[in-house]
Amino acid sequence: MSNQLLQRVARGDHDAFRLLFEEYAEKMHAAVYGYTKSQWVAEELVQEMFIRLWKYRQQLEKVEDTSGYLYRMTFNLINDWLKKTINEKNILEAVAHHKTSNPYDAEQQIRNDELKRILAAAIDQLPPQKKLIYQLNREQGFSYQEIAQMLQLSPSTVKNHLVEATKLLRTYLKNYSLSLALVVVKIFLSN
């Protein structure tokens, strides 16, 4: 039934769009709320999902699994929201830190910024699930239990992903340090 609705939506059928909304809006809202714990954010993201669905309706003709497609759209919007939230939080923390830091400690600030850049590059190398779990725990402060509820995983799975992510980050940073040391030695020997 919902695949037929989606095909009708693809052809611009407003009634089919309304029926699809009635069938899925509450389910999508529950999924988003599970991640964000905010009624307002859940409403906004579900609304955005349906706006995009209508805007790009011509692409729906190829979709075979309506439910899977809508959940994927919703998950992508949640992921974008989480990234935006993390970035906004980091910017606010950086501004607050800058206001309270010693103005004569510019060299240390440059080193800290470089370390943050290296760590961000390392985090970007993580597989998507490990990256998301790492960011939720380390950058947003969510507990294993909270993350498990958001992602519908067991707390032990969340812990395992976090342990593996930490190991991968350590390996990346060790390799980066070794590469940097080799460059410094090469520069030193060439002089």
Image (spheres, grey):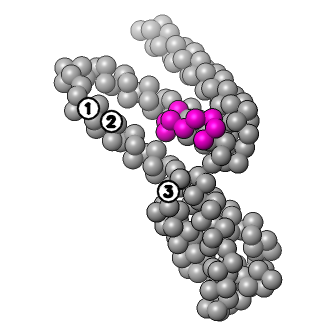
93 shown above or below 17: above
Disc number for residue 98: 1
Do the residues under discs 3 and 2 have CB atoms within 8 angstroms?
no
Q: Are marks 1 and 2 in contact (CB under 8 Å)?
A: yes
Which sits earlier in the primary sequence, circle 3 or circle 2? 3
Residue topped by disc 2: 94
Residue 130, horizontal then vertical, whole percent: 66, 38
- Residue 167 visible at all: yes
Look at the image and tell me in which quarter the N terminus lies: bottom right
In the displayed structure, does residue 7 sit left or right of residue 29?
A: right
Q: CA distance from mark 3 to mark 1?
A: 30 Å
Left or right, 82 with reference to 171: left
Image location (x, y in percent) of residue 170: 61, 21
Q: Nearer the viewer, residue 81 or 150?
A: 150
Between circles 3 and 1, the one closer to the viewer is 3
Image quarter where the C terminus lies is top left
Q: CA distance from mark 3 to mark 2?
A: 25 Å
What range of the chain is rendered magenta? 138-146
Q: Position of residue 139 (x, y in %)?
A: 49, 36
Horizontal relation, residue 48 to residue 169: left or right: left
CB under 8 Å between discs 3 and 1: no
In terms of sequence position, does the residue under pointer 3 or pointer 1 come before the other? 3
Farthest-out residue, left:
103
Residue drawn where x is 51% and y is 29% of the image: 119
Mark carried by residue 38: 3
Residue 135: x and y in percent read 55, 38
State the SS at label 1: helix
- What amino acid does circle 3 point to? Ser
- Secondary structure, mark 3, is loop
User: Tag 1: residue type?
Assistant: His
Tag in front: 3 or 2: 3
As shown in the figure, which amino acid type bears the numbered disc 2? Answer: Ala
